[in-house]
Amino acid sequence: MHVEVRGLNKHFGDFHAVKDVSFGIEKGHLIGLLGPSGGGKTSILRMLAGLESPDAGEIVFHGRKVNDLPPQERGIGFVFQNYALFKHMTVYENIAFGLRVKKANKHVIRERVMELVELTGLKGFEKRYPHQLSGGQRQRVAFARALAPEPQLLLLDEPFAAIDAKIRQELRSWLRELIERVGITSIFVTHDQDEAIEVADEIMIINQGRLEQKGTPWDIYKEPKTPFVATFIGESTLIEDASELKGFGGTGSGAPAKALIRPEYIEVGEPHEFRVISATERGVVKHLHFRGSEWLLEIEVKGHKLVTYRSLEKETLHPGQEISVLVHRAYMFNDEKSWIQENG
Ligand code: ATP
């Protein structure tokens, strides 16, 4: 294991910001820390960086405990949203900075900077100053600067947050390729689930200071450990009391329970299209919305609103129409912490 964290805790005064967080990361993996604002993501990153010290817990890089090492001796590179470039230095000087601090030889510096300029697509921009670059280019310089001293671990805190949507999209796939080519273990903080799903090998869901789940985007989407994770990743409809809904509502005991239903678990059609009538509910189409490659359908079943999608050339259903609804799977729970049962 390249990075190991055991029993990490952090208080700010009375506030318990990071609660008993433990995880391991394999070499070369890109990990996304994802969760709502204030959950503790940045605090975890800052403790790994050595910018904040934990109240309890161990941080181990490549078999070596680093708790007592200052940031500059931990072999890490940072790219933070507001970790600005040096304004009075050119692109070349910015990238060379870490190597100059390390007193590397001039030829070594030149070779490394040119290699990074190439790798980050900044060739021809070496003599420019930060104010002569676009936001996306500046952030690429920040990556090159972080990578120049050949860190063992790269820490990224919302690196694309200040960049507009279209460029951010390009930078995500650029980052994915860059990390694969360089083969460096990386951890990045984001509150954007699409970004985490698209870029990360594994995601860690952080909520209220706790690590709720760690796994591949696929695992987390398909097998969310807690209702919180299921609502945070992917789309779903929450039904507050699903006890009287057939097929997916019954808990056996007749006790009320909440249900989470993903759009792809819902099948709708005209009543005669369903052969398994016993498991279907009657519903009505409320809204239809064309989204390019599919139709979004808002339906109502016994007073509950559900959302699903259909990929059809031409949608045959219309608002107000009576339909049959089959739910293939639903997640049942009473509180955010655990499931009661899973249907389907
Ligand atoms: P965001 O996505 O908004 O950046 P986050 O998940 O990164 O949130 P943190 O920045 O780690 O969350 O903050 C976790 C909690 O700890 C927050 O409630 C924050 O107010 C608190 N906190 C963070 N740093 C300090 C500090 N230096 N002093 C006091 N409280 C702090």
Image (cartoon, helix red, strand yellow):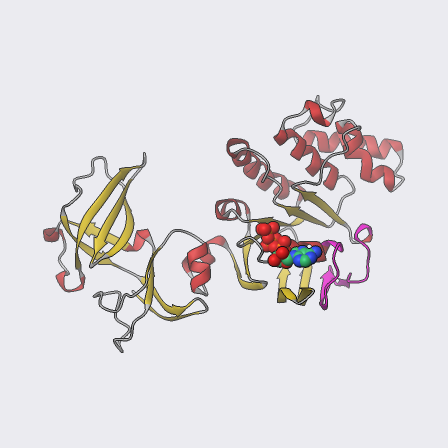
Ligand 1 shown in quarter: bottom right
* 280 on left or right of 223: left
Task: Measuring from the top left, give residue 300's x and y in whole percent.
Answer: 22, 53
User: Is residue 26 visible to us here?
Assistant: no
Asked where in the image residue 93 lies, by quadrant, the reply is top right
Number of labels in the image equals 0
Q: What residue sits 66% from the left and 67% below the top?
A: 14
Q: Quadrant of the N terminus?
A: bottom right
Please provide percent x and percent y for residue 256: 29, 72
Q: Nearer the viewer, residue 16 or 264?
A: 16
Residue 69 is covered by the magenta coloring = yes
Furthest-left residue in this view = 272
Nearer-the-camera pick, 1 or 301: 301
Seen in the picture, residue 183 relative to 109 is either above or below; the reply is below
Determine whether 92 is above or below 231 in the image. Answer: above
- Queried whether the magenta region covers residue 312, the answer comes back as no
Can residue 130 be seen in this snapshot?
Answer: yes
- Residue 304: x and y in percent read 25, 57
Residue located 55% across and 39% down the image:
172
Relative depth, front residue between 99 and 2: 99
Q: Residue most toward the front? A: 14
Q: Which residues are magenta?
A: 49-72
Task: Give the x, y percent position of residue 133.
Answer: 67, 25
Residue at image point 45% right, 61% down: 228
Quarter location, residue 124: top right
Q: Residue furthest bottom?
A: 253
